[in-house]
Image (spheres, helix red, strand yellow):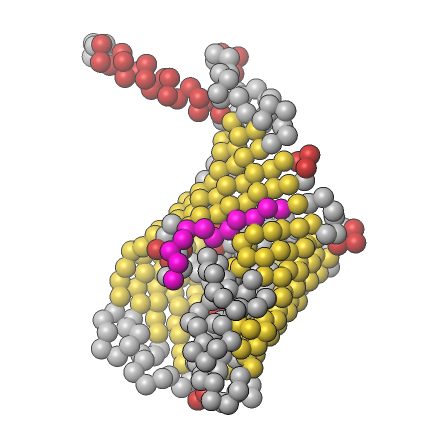
């Protein structure tokens, strides 16, 4: 047996002191004794009110419970392969941190006020024009059932695929339809209700007015963006409505149907709140969406149709009107593995000549397999995407192939 030298004694003592707060912090609930707690020293003042749980972050609560602050974070590490996009370019194999996020949530129940801040530090989390890590900064008031308020920078409440967090996807990333036709984030004010008229959570709405410039920008002369979304849950509300896979495998079917519309009279960008600037000046744009999500016994079916019409005068340059449709089907097995397939189609809006549009007509078929070690908090996803273009532009390489392997950890 090795002798206990002074250095080893010091190391053991340091490990015990460093680990003690974590033992007390792991209490299952405020005020509830942990297993074996009677054998431990009394909870130290600095550890009281600190609760840590995997997948829920670290929460600090005031002694009276009138204020709580939660810190969460996640990382998505991705390896990918894609063939050349332009004739003459090499194929690409890469490793990247696709997303690295930190979330801060504050709650004052007595005042019905909440705070939500999200920062993104991955290279693709940042806007190339303004490399500011701020993605969300919201103050939320929930004092009225039918008219709660959200103020700040947030996701514009338009299409379902965008509203689902990137942490809760069943593929490594969203579809080409979302990439082209979503409204991303903007700064503004939003009214919402998760139980409109008190119908048992069957009717949900979100309606807002936004600055129109998108996130982290201060573009001048953008006018305002108006967006409204209505969601109907005919079989009643369900807590995993904004999670794509059916991890709950509930025998009770759950269904959500959504409708959304948006209008921006002075959009300055190809995709309204994001994308390149129109060289010819602002254009009036209208947006429409219809979507659904069905979950039942491990099966998940999601779909949406999105449209954008950009009004332009003759000679105003390439058009930005587009129509897209997406559908995905997946099944989570009892062993926590999932198989899923997704089809997505994007094309110029009917009535707009293809040669005058900046939107290329294309189809993408994606097949994926995932394993949920601990739900979305710890999962591994593998997928393969095949892209086909009906009339590819000169100089571009089609078909397109992309394979992705992604590991997500969310604490």
Q: Position of residue 94 (x, y in %)?
A: 28, 59
Q: Residue furthest front?
A: 220
Exactly how many numbered labels are in the figure?
A: 0
Q: Which residues are magenta?
A: 129-140
Task: Tell whether position 131 is magenta.
Answer: yes
Task: Tell whether position 17 is magenta.
Answer: no
Res. 321 in view: yes
Give 170 or 397, whichever is nearer the viewer.
397
Q: Position of residue 263 (x, y in %)?
A: 61, 71
From the viewer's perspective, tell me whether residue 232 is left or right of residue 114.
right
Which residue is depicted at the point 47% across and 53% down?
A: 135
Q: Quadrant of the N terminus?
A: top left
Which residue is depicted at the point 49% across and 31% down?
A: 52
From the viewer's perspective, tell me whether residue 65 is left or right of residue 390.
right
From the viewer's perspective, tell me whether residue 224 is left or right of residue 125.
right
Q: Establish if 365 lies above or below 1.
A: below
From the viewer's perspective, tell me whether residue 120 is left or right of residue 50.
left
Q: Establish if 181 lies above or below 18.
A: below
Res. 336 in view: no
Which residue is depicted at the point 43% across and 78% down?
A: 279
């Amino acid at each position: 047996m090795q002798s206990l030298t002074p250095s080893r004694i010091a190391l053991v003592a340091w490990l015990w002191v460093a680990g003690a707060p974590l033992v007390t912090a792991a209490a299952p609930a405020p005020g509830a004794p942990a297993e074996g707690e009677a054998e431990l020293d009394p909870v130290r003042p600095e550890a009281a009110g600190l609760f840590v749980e995997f997948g829920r972050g670290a929460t600090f609560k005031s002694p009276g419970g009138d204020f709580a602050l939660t810190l969460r974070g996640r990382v998505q590490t991705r390896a990918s392969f894609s063939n050349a996009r332009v004739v003459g370019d090499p194929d690409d194999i890469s490793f990247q941190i696709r997303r690295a996020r930190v979330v801060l949530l504050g709650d004052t129940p007595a005042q019905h006020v909440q705070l939500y801040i999200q920062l993104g530090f991955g290279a693709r989390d940042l806007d190339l024009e303004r490399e500011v890590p701020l993605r969300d900064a919201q103050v939320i008031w929930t004092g009225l059932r039918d008219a709660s308020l959200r103020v700040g920078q947030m996701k514009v409440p338009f299409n379902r695929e965008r509203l689902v967090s990137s942490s809760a996807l069943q593929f490594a990333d969203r579809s080409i339809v979302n990439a082209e036709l979503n409204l991303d984030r903007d700064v503004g004010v939003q009214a919402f209700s998760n139980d409109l008229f008190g119908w048992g959570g069957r009717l949900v709405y979100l309606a807002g007015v936004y600055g129109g410039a998108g996130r982290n920008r201060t573009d001048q002369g953008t006018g305002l963006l108006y967006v409204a979304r209505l969601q109907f849950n005919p079989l009643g509300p369900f807590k995993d409505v904004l999670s794509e896979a059916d991890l709950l495998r509930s025998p009770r079917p759950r269904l959500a149907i959504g409708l959304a519309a948006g209008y921006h009279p002075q959009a300055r960008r190809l995709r309204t709140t994001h994308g390149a600037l129109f060289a010819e000046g602002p254009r009036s744009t209208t947006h429409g969406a219809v979507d659904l999500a069905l979950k039942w016994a491990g099966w998940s079916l999601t779909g949406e149709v999105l449209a954008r019409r950009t009004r332009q005068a003759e000679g105003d340059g390439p058009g930005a009107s587009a129509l897209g449709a997406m559908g995905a089907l997946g099944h989570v097995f009892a062993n926590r593995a999932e198989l899923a397939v997704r089809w997505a189609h994007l094309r110029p809006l009917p009535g707009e000549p293809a040669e005058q549009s900046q939107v290329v007509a294309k189809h993408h078929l994606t097949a994926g397999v995932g394993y949920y070690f601990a739900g979305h908090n710890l999962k591994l996803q593998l997928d393969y995407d095949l892209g086909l273009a009906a009339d590819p532009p000169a100089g571009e390489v089609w078909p397109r192939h992309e394979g992705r392997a992604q590991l997500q950890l969310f604490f």
